[in-house]
Image (cartoon, helix red, strand yellow):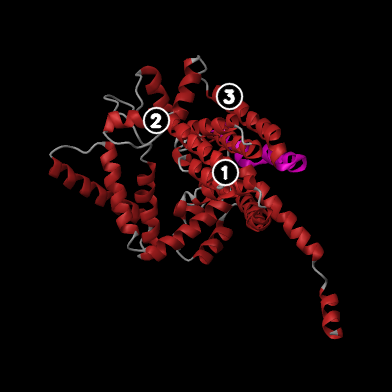
Amino acid sequence: MAIDSPVYLTMSENLLQHHVFSMSSSEPFPPDVFRTPGYPFFLALIQGLGMHSFYWTVFWQELIYLACIALFFVQGRPLFGEKIVRIGVIFLLLEPGGLSYPKQLLSETLFLPFVFCSLLAMGAYMHKARWQPLILSACAAGLGAWVRPAIIYLPLVMTVCVLVFTYKEKRVWLQQGVFLLVFMVMISPWLLRNYNQFGQVIISGQTSNMLAGYHVPITWESAKNEPFEEGFAEVKRLVDQAVEQKSKKLGRPLNQVERYQLQQKFALNELLKYPADYALEWLFGILKTMNGGNATEVYRTLNLRVDRLHYFAIQETNFVKKVGIFLLHQDFLFVLMVFLRVLIGIFALLGVVPIYKSKNAFLWLMLLTNFYFICLPGPMGYARFRFPVEVFWFIQAFYGLTFFTEWLQKRKPATELVQEAVEN
């Protein structure tokens, strides 16, 4: 089981047995706003139908993943062409994340179809400018936010990308306005629930938790040479202290959302003190997200010992030394996985050139979506965020490989260049 799995199970049991959305395993079951309810509801539905075994969940998740591959095969052909789609299908069938995540109690597998559906439906809308795929894209993105709030800003990215290509058409402005409105309608019940419970409109507390619990200690590690574990504990102490002071001032305990807001304010103030270090760590995080091998999930699926992975325990702040330690102390399987990811990453970056030159609106949207999920984790370098766009990242790399191959074919041999120089 992954580290998040017991939490999802507890929440699904609370939904079934106590009809509350809570992470607590005992009364009074306080309402939770850190997680979004999509995946716990999915688990509760399976259990409510009498399928209590873990293998039933795996069965349905495998079907979902295969359905995503079928969706990509059918809807991807008008957008990419037959050849690229077929190669993409093979990639999806062999990709380590696709082999491992459906066998884990994690939200990734349920999140995938909503990202696929939203992106491919928007592609269909770009192709024919019809209302139906546009509304479908907005609904899928909204349902995706119920599973993982990471998608929350993607509809805005989609809208901007569409308008860049069609800003002169008034009808498109109206359609994109409706698109964003439908998305907001889809997530509004959850926002309303949180407002009723906490007096604040919020979709999740994950942002403040990530900023305070990970971004700040990672930045301190670089700026102050303070080990991550010590920084993590120090942040918790300072936030608890601020919460206690605020509670005394108000004369009551802070609710969960108020604590998240205070935590986020503290984190932003700290990060603003070290802008250069934070920016550098963000860049390193993007590289880690781009090239990470989903190793923890893969190792668990293969019943390999996760404690053989040492990358996340490296405290060295120098990136070159960090890579050297990683190569010296890591499993060969993980090194191979990372090597393949690095290769894909290099060609994906090269793929920016032909995609940019193509002036193809959907390819630009694919490019922006890829970087959206890769850049989102920041300094954490969280490869799980890359999973919903793995095949699109691979396609971007395929375009990069094609571009590189064509460049090599057009390039003249060195002997010919020397001969031309002599003649001139």
Q: Is residue 300 visible?
A: yes
**Viewer-side residue, 424 vs 281:** 424
Q: In the rendered image, which residue does mark 1 sit on?
A: 169
Please, what is the three-letter code of the amino acid marked with disc 2? Answer: Ser
Q: Secondary structure at mark 1?
A: loop
Q: Residues within 10 Å of mark 1 (few under 14, many from 20)?
A: few
**Marks 3/1: CA–CA distance:** 43 Å
Residue 145 percent location from the top left of the image: 46, 35
The vertical placement of 225 against 196, above or below, is below
> What residue is shown at x 39% (from left), y 53% (from top)?
215
Magenta span of residues: 80-106
Identify the image quadrant of the C terminus.
Answer: bottom right
Q: Judge whether residue 96 is colored magenta.
A: yes
Left or right of 105? Residue 215 is left
- Which residue matches tag 3? 60
Main SS of residues in magenta = helix
Q: Is residue 159 above or below residue 146?
A: below
Identify which amino acid the numbered label 1 is placed on: Glu
Asked if the stretch drawn in magenta spans residue 365, the answer is no
How many numbered marks, from 0 up?
A: 3
User: In the drawing, does residue 414 fall left or right of residue 154?
Assistant: right
Residue 188 is tagged as 2
Q: In 3D space, how far apart are the residues under numbered discs 2 and 3 (Cα atoms)?
A: 28 Å
Amino acid found under the numbered disc labelled 3 = Trp
**Residue at (53%, 31%) from the top-left corner?**
140
